[in-house]
Amino acid sequence: MADKDLYEVLGVSKNATDDEIKKAFRNKARHLHPDVNKEPDAEEKFKELNEAYDVLSDPQKRSAYDRFGTIPGAASGGPQYVDFDDLFGGGFGMGDLFSTFFGGGGSRGGGRPVSREGRDMGRSLRLTLEEAATGIKREIVYDRLTPCEECEGSGLGPGGQEIECTECHGSGRVVTVQQTFLGAMQSASTCTKCGGTGKSVSNPCPECDGQGRVPDRQRLTVEVPAGIRDGQQLRLRGFGEAGMNGAAAGDLIVSCRIEPHELFERDGDDLHARINVSMFQAALGAQIYVQGIMPDEEVMVKIPEGCQNDQIIRVKEKGMPKLRSTARGDLYAHVTVTVPKKLKRKQREALEKIAAEMGESVNPERPAWQKLRDAFN
């Protein structure tokens, strides 16, 4: 794609409006999709068309392309979106939407699919622990079937109207009879011409082919509340797959996935962190300041006298915010008492004196080279 004009790929001018770009993409996609076009290069051309639409339908990417003549994100392996997984089996992209669209149960010869609600769709949104603590607004990009603007979701073209299906005579069911060794066997099945509605469309909408919905790329800002937990879901009503022929749309279910943190480990609304304390601070007590989870937050951890290694100190209300509440969980500091690896001569003598006063046995005998080193120090 580096040497191709994206506007030429879509067949629009550089001054094309967003609506013109969208319409051009849909029209070309109908003819280039591998389910319809059996030319050997149809799949490659469809991918090029999809990539061109990805850039030109995004105002920021289009602006960058117009200025520099390159495809944003190409150096890093193509367009970068929020990580997502479809609830109904793996990634669901524009190609899958067109496959659903072309094989969506409608009859292009005048049949009409069953009016049914759209599916729920699922996406995964990755967050840092800090973003989960403060809450965040994040734009996500995904492909879905949206209501057709030309027919307002009805599936009817200009002057189109519903008529009784000539195949099932309005019943929505077709009865077939088979002769077997037991005699005539009768069975009923959904009418393939009208999709079970009992109705046909005299003039279906040319934009959506009578389905009332078309494939499109959706950009949506998701507001993640503070305190969201890993695996919790946000349900956005009406942003899933559009229903057929005006039926209600499904919902978009956003699953929040929180990445591990280098300092904090989360347990519900509480946070656990390990802090290093010197042997002197542990013995005498101290006030240690550590970085909190909230922006520019310093948390004071009060080290008691005689603090032991692996002792846990609780700091109230310094954990994660509780979902839809002003309260916070607690911070649990796990203490690691550190011992200096090297001591100067005077420091060693001071410790030896303290050890003697406390009646502790130490090894005062030291090699000559260590004594010489202390002398130089």
Image (cartoon, grey):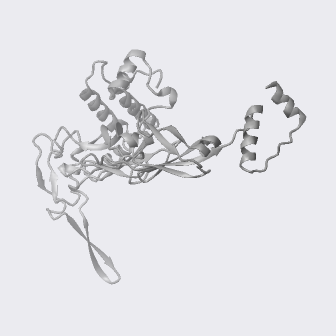
Q: How many labels sit on residues?
A: 0
In the shown orientation, is residue 62 left or right of residue 271?
Answer: left
Residue at the far front in the pictured view: 357
Residue 344 in sight here: no
- Residue most extreme to the right: 368
Q: Name the residue: 16% across, 65% down.
A: 171
Residue 317 placed where, x, y %? 39, 47
* As drawn, 222 above or below 110: above
Q: Is residue 298 left or right of residue 157?
A: right
Q: Residue at x 86, y 39 (%)?
A: 366
Q: Residue furthest top?
A: 67
Of residues 212 and 299, the one drawn nearer to the viewer in this rendering: 299
Task: Name the side, left or right, on which 344 lies relative to 290.
Answer: right
Q: Tell me where residue 23 sits by quadrant.
A: top left
Whole-percent x, y for residue 273 in the image: 52, 46
Q: In front here: 231 or 206?
A: 231
Q: Residue at x 45, y 39 (%)?
A: 299
In which quadrant of the rendered image does the C terminus lie? top right
The front one of 361 and 33 is: 361
Quarter of the figure with residue 284 = top right
- Give the answer, above or below, for where 108 lies relative to 13: below
The answer, for residue 89, to whether it is visible in the render is yes
Q: Nearer the viewer, residue 144 or 100?
A: 144
Give how far across and how far down residue 36 sits, in percent.
Answer: 36, 42
Q: Position of residue 21 (x, y in %)?
A: 29, 28
Q: Report the residue that reaches farthest toward the bottom.
A: 182
In percent of the image, x 32 and y 46: which residue is there? 102
